[in-house]
Image: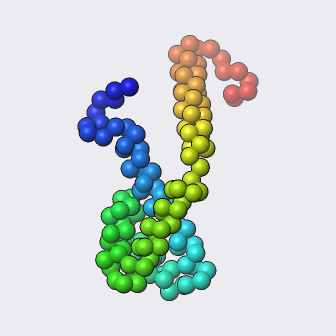
Amino acid sequence: MYVPGFGEASPEAKAAKHLHDFFTYVAVRIVSAQLESYNPEAYMELREFLDTNSVSDGDKFCAALMRRSSRHMNLALRILEVRSAYCKNDFEWDNLKRLSFKNVDGFNTKLMREYVLETSHVEKPDSDK
């Protein structure tokens, strides 16, 4: 299905970019939790970097982290490694599809039901009160 307004990229390509950035966010959380328990100094360095750098663009975040210092380079490499492993081995793709279908269908039904109730002046069933 053609979807206007997406320029050169398809909606799927845009979603893939958002997932890519989300995988970076997840990897940062995983690495941070690992460091907190066995390397408090590196944990603090990562936390300080996070205070001034957004993870909203995962590649930009990792590039900036790599260039900060050699210690930060090692943190960035670990994040890249975890990001790749999480995407390939741990992210539940089938569950994402199932939950996406469920959410779209569920919210569509809810919104349509609310609209019909609002516009038809029918009393809500006791279960909705």
Compared with 1, 48 (above or below) is: below
Q: Position of residue 35 (x, y in %)?
A: 55, 78
* Relative side of 119 to 59, left or right: right
Q: Position of residue 122 (x, y in %)?
A: 62, 14
Q: Quadrant of the N terminus?
A: top left
Coloring basis for residues:
rainbow
Q: Which residue is more in the foreground, 124 or 91?
A: 91
Q: Residue at 29% x, 36% y: name it.
A: 6
Q: Which residue is more in the foreground, 106 or 117?
A: 106
Compared with 25, 110 (above or below) is: above
Q: Residue at 36% x, 59% y: name it.
A: 57
Q: Residue at 47% x, 58% y: name it.
A: 23
Q: Which residue is more in the foreground, 36 or 81?
A: 81
Q: Would you identify the image quadrant in which residue 106 lies?
A: top right
Q: Quadrant of the C terminus?
A: top right
The reply to whether residue 81 is in sight is yes
The reply to whether residue 118 is in sight is no
**Residue pushed farthest bottom?**
41
* Relative side of 110 to 78, left or right: right
